[in-house]
Image (cartoon, rainbow, N blue to C red):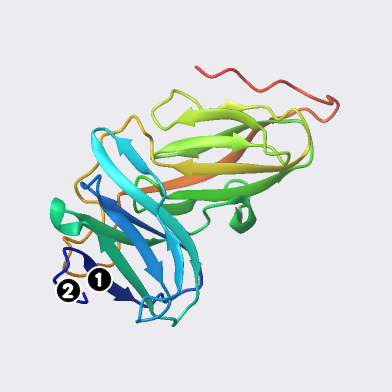
Amino acid sequence: MIHANDGNAYYKFTPNKSGLHRLFTENNQAAIVRLFDDPGLHRQIGSDGQTIEIHGVYFNKMEANLRVNQTYYVQVLNSSSAVTFLTVEEARQSNRETAEAISFDQVYDFDLTSVFDNFYYKFKVAESTQMSVNFTEGLVTLEDQEKNIVTTFESDQEDHVFIPVETGTYYIKLNYDPNDTISTTMARSNIRSIQPFSSLKKGQVSIKVLNRFPHVQSYQCASRT
């Protein structure tokens, strides 16, 4: 932490990977996060734009594409007006462009590090097939290649079965279930230093083929139970 006596807090950090990163404060509606790429705080490259309320907890969030081994500087305005927490995390696989291609009947681990974190996976459907998305934590949104939402599943549902309408590429978006209460183990720091993020939800996901219908052109998606 870079110390100051103006009621604000200042940090610096160096990403160990290039790509999209997420910064947010917790528990202070008045806090404003500004991100710079120079120690003099002249070149602002990002700022949070809205306050988000989740289960009575208030967050101010921003995202930015950062470069590996480049030092960045964070200014948190109004940090002394409440007990403020600051989190910096990698936004890994957080959009369709960075989605990981997965194979059928293989199990993949995921690690949600905050209520804002999400993972994208993609797979190809070559024929009309009854399928099941199996996952242990969070909320799944299934999207087609045109960005249409096919269906959504919660981890505690009895089944996660669907039948694609068309062949092509489909996307699984895995994120924190907003119906869950917020865990106190979320990665954060109490305005002294930026800590490495820790896991909020660890889980596994897989896609399985249940039945094949090689002579049928299209099916409607199975209804959600």
Of tags 2 and 1, the one toward the viewer is: 2
The answer to whether residue 205 is visible is yes
**In the rendering, at what x and y percent does residue 199 appear?**
30, 55
Residue 83 in sight from this viewpoint: no
Q: Please, what secondary structure does the residue beneath circle 1 have?
A: strand
The residue at 53%/29% (across/down) is: 152
Q: Residue at x 26, y 32 (%)?
A: 55
Instruction: Provide residue 113's location: percent of width, then percent of height.
Output: 34, 53
Q: Give the residue type at disc 2.
A: Ala
Query: Is residue 91 found left or right of 55 in the rendered image?
Result: right
Label 2: which secondary element: loop
Disc number placed over residue 10 in the picture, else none:
1
Front-most of 162 and 113?
113
| Residue 94 falls left or right of residue 102 | left
- N-terminal label among 2 and 1: 2
**Looking at the picture, how far across and down is residue 10, in whole percent?**
25, 71
Question: How many numbered discs sit on the rendered protein?
Answer: 2
Answer left or right for 190 relative to 20.
left
Please state which of residues 89 and 113 is positioned toward the viewer in this rendering.
89
The reply to whether callout 2 and callout 1 are in contact (CB within 8 Å) is yes
Q: Which of the image's four quarters has the N terminus?
A: bottom left
Q: Determine the residue positioned at 17% across, 75% down.
A: 3
Q: Is residue 156 above or below residue 199?
A: above
Task: Give the numbered dot on residue 4.
Answer: 2
Residue 149 disc label: none
Q: What kind of residue is marked 1?
A: Tyr
Answer few, some or many: residues within 10 Å of disc 2's Cα (few below 14, many 20 plus, some between 14 and 19).
few
Is 2 or 86 nearer to us in this picture? 2
Q: Point out residue 65 in the picture as x, y percentages from the top left corner.
A: 51, 66
